[in-house]
Image: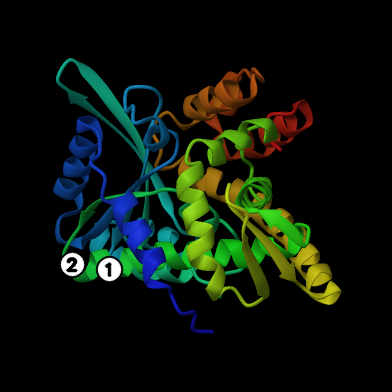
Amino acid sequence: MIVSIPPLLTTLIERKSSRPAPPGVRALAGELLNRYGDAAQAILFYGSCLRTGDDSDGIVDLYLLVDSYRAAYRSRRQAFTNKLLPPNVFYLELPVQDRVVRTKYAVLTLKDFQRGTSVQWFHSYLWGRFAQPVGLIYARDSQVASQVRAALARAVITFITRVLPQITDRFTARDLWRQGLLLSYRAELRSERPQNLVHLFDDAAGYYEHLTRAAMDSVPFAVEVVDKGNGFHYQADIPAGVRNRNHLAWGLRNIQGKMLSILRLGKAFFTFEGGLEYIQWKIERHSGVQVEWTPRLKKHPLLAVVVLGWRLYRRGGFR
């Protein structure tokens, strides 16, 4: 299915993604370019550090888009695992002036990124993330920049298309995005509690409002837009059968996503230095659930993924 992208949607994303990144993030991007050289196509900046504009608190989330996995790695094993179960995740820390900046960066081909943000991609792993605000801090050339921004626009359209059948016929952009963010976070082993997801919309409410209005003409449903003076309201005509199938699809995404999250965690322990400590910090920071790693689990990370994943789920570390 070919989805037309409204020019206004592309314009909004271009403006948002072109905002300058903090110095620490630019330094991290420069180091990635040094490491990956000609294989690097683009670098995306997203997540909590983008929302706050502060790269000194926590770990910067970056996506490195490459032309091919074989070109990105010297190791055939790393190239194979990245292709088999994308993305590969790595850790990097870098001294910048009088401090240290840290990043958790994921590697993905531009082609896989384009596929993962489209309506052809079932799971929300990519289109759920990249429908949210993103910074494009490096692109090899103008053509790559255009391809990335088009993929970000498709992520928004895919997100709205998948979420609309899950909300009431009459809704606002706030209703749509809050429900969609909750659904996409639930489809993975994410440590954020539902009440914290409210702020994801509120932190960029104006941007989400404009995105929704710009993208609505491209969704495959009849949606009426009403300007009530204080903001746009929407009314969608979605058949009951579509809603039922959509509900089933989100149930399958929840099962698939948690299984894939466990597999990705296991794979990341072989590439992510300090992986156990990072996961512990992340869970405690966002959920308040404290965990302890026994010496045995530290020696056997795959066992740690299975055993502690289940324990944390039971204690409320994952939702």
Kind of residue at badge 2? Ser
10 Å crowding of disc 2: few (<14), some (14-19), many (20+): few
* Residue at 23% from the left image edge and 41% from the top image edge: 20
> Secondary structure beneath disc 2?
helix
**Residue 292: x percent and y percent?**
62, 17
Residue 214 lies left or right of residue 106; in this view the side is right
Q: Are marks 1 and 2 in contact (CB under 8 Å)?
A: yes
* Residue at 61% from the left image edge and 52% from the top image edge: 173
Image: 106 above or below 103 = below
Q: Tell me, what colour scheme is on the image?
A: rainbow
**Residue 151: x percent and y percent?**
40, 67
**Residue 189: x percent and y percent?**
64, 42
| Residue 66: quarter of image | bottom left
Residue 7 lies left or right of residue 205; in this view the side is left
Kind of residue at badge 1? Ser
* Residue at 24% from the left image edge and 67% from the top image edge: 144
- Locate the C terminus and report the quarter of the image it occupies: top right
| Residue 190: quarter of image | top right
* Residue at 14% from the left image edge and 20% from the top image edge: 97
> How far, Cα to Cα, is label 1 from label 2?
6 Å
**Residue 291: x percent and y percent?**
64, 19
Circle 2 residue = 142
10 Å crowding of disc 1: few (<14), some (14-19), many (20+): some
> Secondary structure beneath disc 1?
helix
Which label sits on residue 146?
1
